[in-house]
Structure formats: C-alpha cells, structure tokens
Image (cartoon, rainbow, N blue to C red):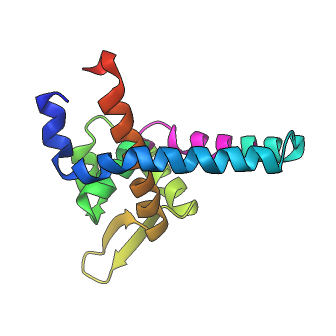
Amino acid sequence: MNRKREVYFKHYKELYKLIPIIQKTTKECTIMERGALLHDTNRITMEREDLKLFFNLIQGKWTLDLIHTLNITGEINYNEIKKILKGIGSRILTDRLKLLETKGLVKRNIHDTRPVHISYKLTEFGEGLVELMVPVVLYFLLNVKQLG
C-alpha cells in the first residue's frame, strides 16, 4: 500500500483483514443460490433490474461525492457542501439532495432558528449503504495495480 493510501486507510486495517472472510461467505452463498434456483430467468431479470436501479442511482453526477461528503462531515448545510464540492452547480446540488432524500439516503433537517437553518445528513439507511461500500472500495484501491 502506498504512503498516501496508508494515511486514508489507517483505521481500516481490521476491516481489510475481514475482506477474505466476506468474499468466502459471499461465494458460498452464491453457490447455494445457483444450485437452488438454477436458470430461473424471471429471477435473473428481476435481480438485473434491481442492480441497474442501484447503480443508476449512485453513478449520477456528483452523487458519490455528495454521499462521501455527508458521510465524512455528519450534518452539514447547503453552503458548506458547495464549499467542499468545488465546481458543483446549485441546481445539480439541489437535484441530487432531493433525489437522495426521495430514495431515503439523505435527511433534510429544518432548524427552528432565525434565519431558518437547513442541514443535511445521511439517514440510517444511507449510512448503512456507505458502511457496506467501504470494504468494496478498500479492496479495489488496495488491489488494482495501475492505481499505485
């Protein structure tokens, strides 16, 4: 692991040790599923649609940047997000926040202050999604040689 990545991942050493166990368990479950539902075309089609739904959501422009920012900062207001995500337009930021709120990943909090203060944070569902994505990203970054 190069020095720069070591800084980012120093707290994930225990998680990295679990990746082979996660992979082995996933493989075992996949093999059981294959055996139980061999060539179930309806199921394959349904699952493919669910995968497309998930990947279409997270691959939207600025979506992963926004999820990462909310994960790292906790609760943050709109203008602070704009400062962190240099180059994001107001309209796209508003659209992404609304989409993620609609999908249940982000919660919009309106604080009863003068002037009204609005902040955003990941929901429990959004945090859970990030927690599951961290091992995948970690595995990818530590094993892809051309990134080194």
**Which quadrant of the figure has residue 48?**
top right
Q: From the viewer's perspective, tell me whether residue 7 is left or right of residue 50.
A: left
Residue 22: x and y, percent? 46, 50
- Which image quadrant: the N terminus? top left
Identify the residue at horizontal 32%, vertical 15% (top origin). Answer: 146
- The residue closer to the viewer here, 121 or 130, is 130
Identify the residue at horizontal 28%, vertical 66% (top origin). Answer: 75
In this view, the residue farthest toward the bottom is: 112
Instruction: Determine if residue 89 is in view.
Output: no
- The residue closer to the viewer here, 108 or 33, is 33
Q: Is residue 34 above or below residue 74?
A: above
Q: The magenta stretch spans which residues?
A: 49-63
- Verify whether residue 51 appears in magenta: yes
Identify the residue at horizontal 28%, vertical 51% (top origin). Answer: 81
Q: How many labels sit on residues?
A: 0
**What kind of secondary structure does the magenta stretch mostly adopt?**
helix
- Which image quadrant: the C terminus? top left
In this view, the residue farthest toward the top is: 146
Instruction: Determine if residue 101 is in view.
Output: yes
Q: From the viewer's perspective, tell me whether residue 45 is left or right of residue 32.
A: right
**Which quadrant of the figure has residue 87?**
top left
Residue 25: x and y, percent? 54, 51
- The residue closer to the viewer here, 117 or 31, is 31
Q: From the viewer's perspective, tell me whether residue 30 is left or right of residue 13.
A: right
Residue 58: x and y, percent? 51, 43
Residue 19: x and y, percent? 39, 46
Q: From the viewer's perspective, tell me whether residue 95 is left or right of residue 31.
A: left
Identify the residue at horizontal 23%, vertical 54% (top origin). Answer: 80
Q: Is residue 37 above or below residue 102?
A: above
